[in-house]
Each structure stands twice: as structure tokens, then as C-alpha cells.
Image (tube, coloured by chain):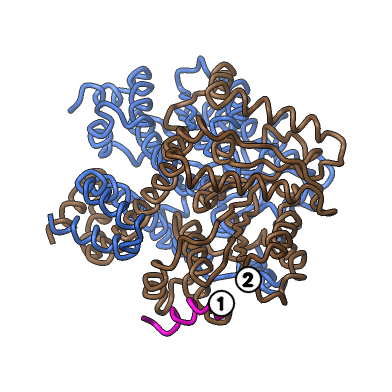
Chain colours: A blue, B brown
């Protein structure tokens, strides 16, 4: 076993920091380390935290750390900003808000803003979670900045997804994309002391009750072209059975005052138990693992094909540029060439 | 040649409509048709139009159609909403605003909101542009709803990218992500009769003058973790050389009154000429073609691997689930198995 891996398993924070950097950069012995530590993973409980900017995600995350620490749990935090390194203001804010935990050896916080290739960020997040898991974290919180497609993919690396909302941020419910409704395991209406909190909760309850089918129907009625492929098919696969058995609870909180936080933690614990003890929960974990392998295979194939087919790829580009060959036929030939070597 | 292909090349609008549907759904003989018509593509000038919601993109698009039609050009329009089928209100609005062109046989407008797989939307948009191109469109406008990562990828299917802004939408410049600055070939400050238009233009000029490097430096100075991979490497490849030679002009317009539109069209024409007559321009076109082939290859490989490795993939998931094998080693074995069949 790699020396770095041994130090990670022993919980050495400097080794963890170094491994997270390697994993995020895909540099050095990152892959060896991940392989080494994998058998020691699967112990941590991983929570994805997402929601619109301004909902108070990082304050809530800070409070969750506090509650888990008081219960004696070691906590890892990964803050992800997929949109761009330039919208990193939120991350900077997170760091300031969470800095009171910086000296606590039982807390490890790390930001990531890399956008390498398609799917690169959710893969990085997943691998970083594994390092934290192997190093002895009992809970790993993965906080994302926004609610876009990237964020949805990142929350899928978690066991449970907490969607944070706040009243008065404009049209809350419109902001919940269909994919988010599918992904949410627990809703937290933060800033619940504000006007409009009751209305936000009512809207959410209605939306959960109506379910996705009605949303689709309403969208069609408004004249939109809704293809069935528009819904992430893997999301359907994973969420479909769980919808039957798990109904996401809605919790009120005022994170700035620490109110309602233990209730959120309890709701998450119930979801974790559901995942581990019901056939639907186990099926979901398995579906997500299958998804991960498929994504990893996709990346590995294109990496290897790009390397081994470099001259053929360049020749194909030239032929397509001169319109001697079409790009669709060229792609088919390249796949054949890759398999025959 | 497929009968549908022949009708497309003859400019039959019903055949075009049918082909666009097939291409978007990947159904029927979509691939045969694309292969058939490809040699007849490359004649249309493709313009990507992007910018924040509220900037007036669709009104501007409507005016651009008008100017091109007056010059006797056939125009195709593809409206793309990558975020979700539910935020399709903007598309509905587009349709209403552009409906005055609906009866003009020289204009073909089509919306697309499909999100199949990663990269699926930009691929669909590119293939739809090709059908419109082959059917005799002189200009194809690809309008996207927002300014996210998906939109950036879609604009890369165009020859020229027009970024539309408007004063008074909040912090304009912050909203311009670095990727967008790299992608913009022409800026249009719409609603230029409003307060704040001069300030928006000044900010834009400054931002273009400073260039990306300074933005990066400033971001680092604010304490953000900026990895070099955070910048899309292909964007750099494509935009790098062009930055030396092409400086995006900034045009004022009031699209609702039709003011400044011909100036935008002229700026686009200059950019088109730059693309076709300079080595930097040709290098950019080639780089984008190479990118397209690589993306198509990625998708084709995973599709074929998923089919031919189905039992092996399922067995790997089971082994990883039991932690008998790690997912990284499992992926390597799957790639080997794929190449050896």
C-alpha cells in the first residue's frame, strides 16, 4: 500500500489534504491512493446540500457541522462551485462562515472549483468524499453553490440530498426544476421566521403531492414541447421506486439562530435508515453505483481512444473539413478502429 | 439517397420539419438523412445568440431575421432551452414574438428543449443546423435561453457568437462568465436608450482590454482556488489565437424600435470574413470540428460499450457494491474487455 494511503487510513489530516489535492488535479499517485483506500470506504454518511443562492446553505451547513460535532462525529465538508471559478464569491463566503470550525481537528473543509471535462466535477467530488470517508469522517457534507444541472449530478454522489429554500427569494417553486424535486430527500425551508415561509411550505407540499406527472402535464398544457428524453432517464430510474416509499419531509429552520437544525439532522437520519433497510433504498444505492461505473467507463474510453487514435482522429478531421467524409461515418470508423487494435 | 434527404435538398419545408423532428429524437432514419445531406452543408452562415434573460435576445433575433430577409436571404432559426422543459416560458415568448415571420416561406423556426444525455443538446442543435443548411438556409440563427455552461457549448456550434446584454439587469459584467468573454465574437448592448447603457459599454470595453489573464489574477487575489483546468481547455485552444487577431466589437441597439440592427449584421459579416480569410479564423473552425468529432466519438464509444458489455458491467457493479473490487480497477478491466472483443 502507498505510504500516503496508510496515512489517510490513520486519519492524518495533512495526508488527507495532500490526497484531496492530488485527486482534484488527477496528478501523482491519485489513482493508486483511491484504489488503496476504497475497501475502507462506505462507512461515512454523505449528505448533498443544494438550493438557490441566498437560501442560506452555508449557514445551515455550519450549523449541521455543529450538531454533528456535538454528537461526537467527525465531519468532512466539500464545497463545490461548478458554474465558474469567477462566481467563487459564494465559496469565499462559505469559508468565512465556516472558519470557526477551522481549528477543530474533527472537521475537514475543502473547496473545489475545477471544471475539467464533462462530468469531471461530480467525479472529483465523489473521489474526494471517498478520501474523507476512508480517513475516518463519520459524516461528509457536499455543498454546492446553485441548482443547475451540474449541481444535480453532484448531489447524486450523496446518500441523501437536502434542498434548502428560503421565502422571499422570488418565485421559489418555479426555481425548483423537475430534476431537483426528484432528487430531494429532505427539504429545509430556512429563514422560516420571515413572511412567506408558510406559503413556501404550502407550495412545496402541493408540489410533492402533485408529483412529476402533473408538472409535465401542466407544462404541456402551457404549450411547451416536452420530450420524454427531457427528463434525465437515470434520475427516473433511481428516484422512481423511492418515490413510492420515501416522501421527502419539509423542515423549518432559522439557521442564523440555530433553530430547527436537530430536526433536519433527524430527518436525514431517517432517510439514511430508509436507504439501508428497505429494498427500494438499496436499489437506489445500487442504481447510483451503476451510474458511476458507466460514467467512469465513458471517460476512460474516450481518454484511451484519443491517445491510441490520435493520427486517425486528425486524418478524420481533415476529411470531414474537406467534406470528403461526413462526421457520422467518420465516428463509426473510429469506433471500429479502436476495437480492432 | 433517402427520399427525405432529396426533399430536404430541394428545400421542401415539410421534409425539413420532419427531419428536424427525427434528428432531435434520434428516431427513424435520422442518421442516414444526416449522412446524405452532409456534403451539401457548409454554405449557411451560423450565428449563435446568447445572453441573460431579459436582455432582449428574441426581439433582437426577430429584427435580425427581418434584416436578412430584406437582403433576400433564407433564414433558419433554432431556439434552444437547455435548462429544463419547465423554464420554457421564454421559448413560448420567442414564438409569439417571431410569429410574424411564421407565414414567410423564407423563414423556418424550430424550438428544441430535449436533454438526452451529456452533450446531447449541443449535438442536436448542430445536427439541426446542418439540416437547415442543406435545405438552403443562407443564415441559421441559434438562440439560447441563458448563459450557462450548456449555452456556451451550444454557441460553439456556430461560426459567430453574438452576446446580447442590456443595462439595468443588475450587475451585467459579473454575469459575464469568463467562458462567455472567450466565446463572444460580437457584443450587442440592447435597450441602449436606457440609463446605464454607457456604463455597461465602458465596463465591457475595460473587460475586453484587460483580457482573461487579469480576470484570473483578480480572482486569485480575492482568494479563490483557481485551477488551470477550471478554464475549458478547448475554449482556450479555439479562442487563444483568435484573441490575437479578432477583438469583439460592441454595438448599441434598441431592438424594439429596430435601431442599430444593420450595424450588428455588419459586425457579424466582418467576423465571418475574418473566419474565412485569416489563418486564425480557419484554425478556429478546424479546432471546433475536431472537438465535435471527439464528442461524437465519446458518445458512440459508451453507447457501444454499454451494449456489448452489459453482463460484465452488471457483474462489476455487484463486485464494487460488495467492495470486493474498487470502481477504478473495474473500469480498467471493462475498457480492456471492450477492446479485446
Q: Nearer the viewer, residue B126 or B260?
A: B260
Between marks 1 and 2 in the image, the one whose residue lies nearer the viewer: 2
Q: For the point 73% across and 70% down, which residue is it?
A: B101
Circle 1 is placed at which residue position? B17
Circle 2 is placed at which residue position? B108
Corner quadrant of residue A10: top left
A314 relative to A103 in the view: left or right: left
Q: Nearer the viewer, residue A73 or B69?
A: B69
Q: Residues within 10 Å of mark 1 (few under 14, many from 20)?
A: some
C-alpha gap between disc 1 and disc 2:
9 Å
Subunit ID for the residue under disc 1: B
Q: Is residue B302 above or below residue B329?
A: below
Q: For the point 68% across and 28% down, which residue is it?
A: B205
Point out residue B225 in the picture as x, y percentages from the top left corner: 50, 24
Q: Is residue B175 above or below residue A66?
A: below
Corner quadrant of residue B5: bottom left
Mark toward the start of the polypeptide (1 vs 2): 1
- The residue stretch that appears in magenta: B1-12
Point out residue B90 in the picture as x, y percentages from the top left corner: 71, 59
Q: Is residue B336 visible?
A: yes
Q: Are marks 1 and 2 on the same chain?
A: yes
Mark 1 touching mark 2, by CB under 8 A? yes
The quarter of the image holding the N terminus of chain B is bottom left
The quarter of the image holding the C terminus of chain B is bottom left
Point out residue A260 in the picture as x, y percentages from the top left corner: 68, 38
Q: Residues within 10 Å of mark 2 (few under 14, many from 20)?
A: many
Subunit ID for the residue under disc 2: B
Amino acid at each position: 500500500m502507498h505510504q500516503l494511503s496508510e496515512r489517510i487510513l490513520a486519519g492524518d489530516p495533512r495526508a488527507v489534504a495532500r490526497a484531496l489535492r492530488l485527486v482534484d488535479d488527477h496528478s501523482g499517485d491519485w489513482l493508486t491512493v483511491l484504489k488503496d483506500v476504497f475497501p475502507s470506504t462506505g462507512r461515512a454518511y454523505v449528505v448533498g446540500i443544494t438550493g438557490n443562492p441566498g437560501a442560506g446553505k452555508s449557514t445551515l451547513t455550519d450549523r449541521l457541522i455543529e450538531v454533528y460535532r456535538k454528537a461526537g462525529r467527525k465531519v468532512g465538508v466539500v464545497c463545490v462551485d461548478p458554474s465558474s471559478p469567477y462566481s467563487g464569491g459564494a465559496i469565499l463566503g462559505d469559508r468565512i462562515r465556516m472558519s470557526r470550525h477551522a481549528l477543530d481537528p474533527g472537521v475537514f473543509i475543502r473547496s473545489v472549483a475545477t471544471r475539467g471535462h464533462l462530468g469531471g466535477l461530480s467525479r472529483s467530488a465523489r473521489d474526494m468524499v471517498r478520501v474523507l470517508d476512508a480517513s475516518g469522517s463519520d459524516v461528509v457534507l457536499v455543498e454546492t453553490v446553485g441548482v443547475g444541472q451540474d449541481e444535480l449530478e453532484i448531489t447524486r454522489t450523496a446518500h441523501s440530498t437536502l434542498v434548502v429554500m428560503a421565502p422571499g427569494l422570488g418565485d421559489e417553486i418555479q426555481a425548483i426544476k423537475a430534476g431537483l424535486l426528484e432528487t430531494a430527500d429532505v427539504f429545509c425551508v430556512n429563514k422560516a421566521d420571515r413572511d412567506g415561509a408558510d406559503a413556501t411550505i404550502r407550495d412545496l407540499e402541493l408540489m410533492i403531492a402533485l408529483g412529476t406527472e402533473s408538472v409535465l402535464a401542466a407544462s404541456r398544457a402551457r404549450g411547451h414541447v416536452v420530450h420524454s428524453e427531457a427528463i434525465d432517464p437515470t434520475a427516473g430510474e433511481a428516484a422512481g421506486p423511492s418515490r413510492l416509499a420515501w416522501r421527502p419531509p419539509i423542515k423549518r429552520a432559522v439557521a442564523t439562530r440555530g433553530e430547527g437544525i436537530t430536526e433536519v439532522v433527524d430527518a436525514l437520519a431517517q432517510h439514511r435508515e430508509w436507504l439501508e433497510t428497505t429494498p427500494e433504498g438499496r436499489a437506489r444505492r445500487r442504481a447510483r453505483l451503476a451510474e458511476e461505473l458507466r460514467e467512469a467507463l465513458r471517460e476512460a474510453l474516450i481518454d484511451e481512444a484519443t491517445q491510441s487514435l490520435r493520427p486517425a482522429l486528425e486524418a478524420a478531421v481533415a476529411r470531414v473539413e474537406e467534406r470528403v467524409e461526413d462526421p457520422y461515418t467518420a465516428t463509426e470508423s473510429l469506433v471500429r478502429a479502436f476495437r480492432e487494435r
